[in-house]
Image (spheres, rainbow, N blue to C red):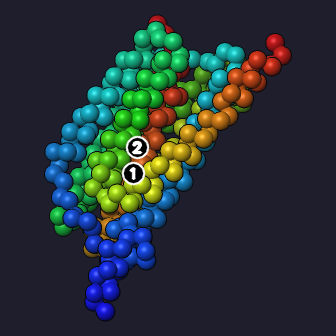
Amino acid sequence: MGTTHAHAGHVETGPKLYYLTWVWLLTLTAIEVTLAYFHLPVGLMLFLLMGLSIVKAALIMAHFMHLRFERLSLVVTLIPAMVLCITLLAVFFPDGVRAFRLAVR
Amino acid sequence: MAEHIERLRFAEWEGGVSPFAVGSKKLGMWLFIVSDSLTFSGLLVGYSYVRIASERWPMPFEFWPTIVMATLMTFCLLSSSLTMALAVRASSLGDRSRTVRFILLTMLGGILFILLHAREWAGLIAEGVRMWENPWGVPLFGASFFTLTGLHMLHVASGVIYLSVIALGVSRGRFTHEDVEISGLYWHFVDLVWMFIFPLVYLLSVKMP
């Protein structure tokens, strides 16, 4: 128990950072909703929406979840493995397209 | 002896005292979050798979009410994340009544989200969307929609219950700052997942005017 509060430095973040993060998240959401009504090719739309969502997720993790102020060893242990596993799930997509081409019409 | 312990403290990966410099409860929550993010990723990838494997995926969401309501729900969740971050800050400053008040605000955001979402579900069900059938063809539309948003709603609902327990404990002085911070991690994660469900499920299925 004695080591529970052995935070590296124990950074005190002001509320200003939280409000700023909130404003940015709302702005990015507004951009996403507006973007959805542009007539863009699906691939480009997906790329833009996912890009913005990843930025939003990074903002939430870094500021709200305090990951920016944790020791780097924690970040390195958690995030790359998670991102790799999620990315590996994309291995199924070529099969989705194949199923579509093989479908009986 | 003291010198030995001092060396261990700095040798982070060689039996050091606390290589991540977080408590075991907080590390546990982080590991849960990583595994839960894979659950949601699996569902989102499954949804995307059936979507690209279907010839004509329905795009039924009107600007009013669905997209406006879903945007409002996003606003509720983002704002509740802000109040949760402020609650964690208040508890780190030792201000218990402020902590409880901010947690209650966070719960309010979560409850509003659930109510708006339930209203939307009711609307879709009234339109004839079911788990295995809907008026627009492609039966898997309902299955993927209800599974994804339902699992997320379950997370929000259990988050509200979790936060109520934390608020009660803090007001009685039973829980420490670490407990509040950990519940905050969970809440922000639920918010984070919605940041992917919202564009993938709603914004990519808007009915173009």
- Residue B209 screen position, x and y as percent: 46, 7
- Same chain for marks 1 and 2? yes
Residue, x 64% and y 19% (percent of image)? Answer: B57
A32 above or below A22? above
* Kind of residue at disc 2: Asp
For residue A27, the mark is none
For residue B191, the mark is 2
Q: Name the outermost residue toward the bottom.
A: B1
Instruction: Determine whether label 1 and label 2 are within 8 Å by CB.
Output: yes
Q: In the shown orientation, is residue B19 left or right of residue B38?
A: left
Residue B2 lies in what quarter of the image? Answer: bottom left
Disc 2 element: helix
Residue, x 41% and y 42% (percent of image)? Answer: B192
Chain where mark 2 sits: B
Q: Residues within 10 Å of mark 2 (few under 14, many from 20)?
A: many
A76 above or below B61? below
- Residue B35 screen position, x and y as percent: 54, 54
Residue, x 81% and y 12% (percent of image)? Answer: A105
* Kind of residue at disc 1: Trp
Gap between marks 1 and 2 measured at Cα: 6 Å
Q: Name the outermost residue toward the right.
A: A104
A70 above or below B145? below
Residue, x 45% and y 29% (percent of image)? Answer: A50
